[in-house]
Image (tube, rainbow, N blue to C red):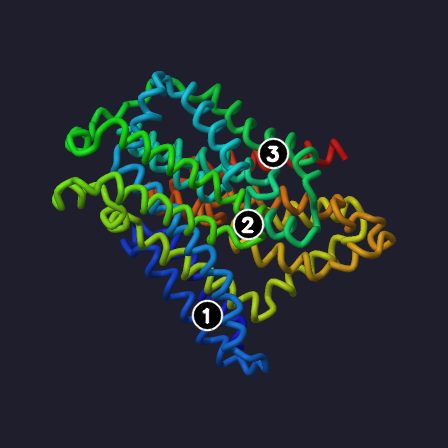
């Protein structure tokens, strides 16, 4: 009785989040509510597991994401309050909407492979706010950044949380770059080709300047903060590769370096001027509700994972579609991709890793499809990474941009979801064809 009730609470909470604007209830409040209620219900489910240990296990993973998000958002806000993004916006001269769609999408696609889709989305969302004035334009480009960032993150071992998981546990190797790049590129380009026949006109450029900040910062100071901020973000995956530590450690280290440099740069300014370009000021601008939204959603999904519902789902897919056959593998992963737009892709991938771990050491299991760099794992990385784009809260990139740009769930469903499905299925078909 308790488990169906948990599923009901999760589903109803999901609907309230979807209709956030008509109901005028902030999505962060709803997410925290369903996260707390689902865990409270699970506590009364009669389970025999150690609840405190189980919750701590999930909190570690959730905290890593939240600290990473907080660090990245602070770095981006620090660059913003110092006028650093003007360096980029001044170089993009065109106002043609179609040209900008291709430029912004390709930047997000390749940048997310080097950083990851979450950090890339935060940076690009801030850029869009600086570049454009019209809300519809900002939302359209924000939606396309989600598609491109998730597609770009899927072909890189460090581009998405799920690919990092698979790469860290040696389910896939650097070979994923070669095998998944073309399907991911197709996934990103197909929506752009479709829009090329639909989009016309010019983007209304945001002419609002930060003249007051120009009086505070010299051009040299602005350049130093911008380039240190960019390299700080680029350092995060390098730190992960060198040390093996979680990405949030690299992000916090990068923030510390930028913080020290900014303090030194502004050391001779008056307290009033320094307060407008400091990290403390940037922290006040960080979108805290988005962080709480992440926390609530991840808590809710983790409760379902601990209750065994995601494992039941994975086993159902395996038995229904014959997970040891090639066609079954393709079908299962495509469904996992769509499911990752509803629930977090991390527990779905974690469940699959547990179910098919034997395939890594037993080449005869599943005809070798589950060995290292096997078809199942590569296609899982693609599907779990890009399928979340179908709904705006189906990926970390989507949640971040939804919070920063205040994109409406229903608007995204009407205007972006079809593009996401077209790209996702086109990329899936490309991978299947190449195999």
Left or right of 108? Residue 23 is left
Secondary structure of residue under mark 3: helix
User: What's the mark number on residue 38?
Assistant: 1
User: What's the mark number on residue 184?
Assistant: 3
At 47% from the left and 66% from the top, the residue drawn is 59
Left or right of 150? Residue 207 is left
Q: Position of residue 99 (x, y in %)?
A: 43, 18
Is 378 situated above or below 323?
A: above
Contact (Cβ within 8 Å) of mark 1 with mark 2: no
Earlier sequence position, callout 1 versus callout 3: 1
Depth-wise, is mark 3 or mark 2 nearer the camera?
2
Contact (Cβ within 8 Å) of mark 1 with mark 3: no
Is 296 situated above or below 251?
A: below
Q: Which residue is mark 2?
A: 161
At 54% from the left and 42% from the top, the residue drawn is 238
Q: Position of residue 285 (x, y in %)?
A: 26, 47
Q: In this orientation, which residue lies closer to the viewer: 212 or 15?
A: 212
Left or right of 85? Residue 366 is right
Is 107 situated above or below 294?
A: above
Q: In this orientation, which residue lies closer to the viewer: 319 or 292?
A: 292
Secondary structure of residue under mark 2: helix
Is 149 situated above or below 349?
A: above
Distance from label 1 to label 2 (Cα)? 24 Å
Neighbor class of circle 3 (other Cα within 10 Å; few <14, some 14-19, many 20+) is many
At 47% from the left and 24% from the top, the residue drawn is 195
Earlier sequence position, callout 3 versus callout 2: 2
């Amino acid at each position: 009785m308790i488990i169906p009730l948990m599923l009901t609470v999760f589903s109803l909470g999901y609907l309230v989040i979807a209709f956030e604007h008509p109901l005028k209830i902030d999505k962060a409040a709803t997410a925290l509510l369903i996260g707390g209620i689902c865990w409270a219900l699970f506590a009364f489910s009669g389970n025999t597991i150690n609840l405190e240990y189980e919750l701590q296990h999930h909190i570690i993973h959730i905290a890593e994401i939240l600290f990473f998000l907080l660090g990245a958002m602070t770095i981006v806000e620090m660059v913003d309050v110092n006028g650093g993004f003007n360096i980029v916006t001044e170089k993009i001269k065109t106002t043609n909407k179609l040209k900008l769609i291709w430029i912004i999408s390709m930047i997000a696609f390749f940048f997310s492979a080097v950083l990851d889709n979450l950090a890339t989305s935060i940076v690009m969302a801030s850029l869009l706010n600086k570049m454009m004035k019209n809300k519809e334009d900002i939302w359209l480009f924000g939606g396309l950044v989600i598609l491109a960032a998730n597609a770009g993150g899927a072909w890189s071992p460090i581009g998405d949380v799920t690919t990092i998981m698979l790469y860290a546990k040696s389910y896939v190797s650097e070979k994923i770059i070669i095998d998944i790049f073309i399907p991911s590129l197709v996934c990103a380009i197909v929506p752009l080709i479709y829009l090329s026949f639909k989009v016309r006109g010019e983007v209304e450029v945001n002419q609002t300047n930060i003249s007051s900040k120009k009086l505070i910062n010299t051009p040299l100071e602005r350049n130093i903060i911008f380039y240190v901020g960019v390299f700080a973000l680029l350092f995060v995956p390098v730190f992960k590769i060198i040390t093996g530590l979680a990405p949030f450690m690299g992000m916090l280290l990068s923030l510390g370096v930028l913080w020290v440099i900014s303090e030194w740069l502004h050391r001779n300014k008056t307290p009033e001027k320094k307060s407008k370009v400091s990290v403390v000021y940037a922290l006040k601008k960080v979108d805290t509700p988005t962080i709480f939204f992440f926390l609530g959603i991840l808590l809710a999904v983790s409760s379902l994972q601990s209750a065994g519902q995601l494992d039941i789902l994975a086993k159902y897919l395996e038995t229904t579609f014959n997970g040891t056959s090639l066609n079954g593998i393709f079908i299962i992963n495509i469904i996992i991709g769509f499911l990752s737009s509803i629930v977090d892709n991390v527990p779905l991938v974690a469940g699959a890793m547990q179910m098919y771990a034997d395939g890594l050491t037993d080449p005869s299991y599943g005809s070798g499809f589950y060995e290292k760099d096997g078809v199942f794992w590569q296609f899982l990385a693609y599907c779990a990474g890009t399928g979340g784009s179908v709904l705006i809260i189906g990926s970390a990139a989507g949640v971040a941009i939804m919070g920063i740009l205040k994109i409406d769930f229903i608007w995204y469903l009407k205007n972006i979801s079809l593009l996401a499905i077209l790209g996702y299925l086109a990329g899936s078909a490309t991978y299947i064809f190449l195999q």
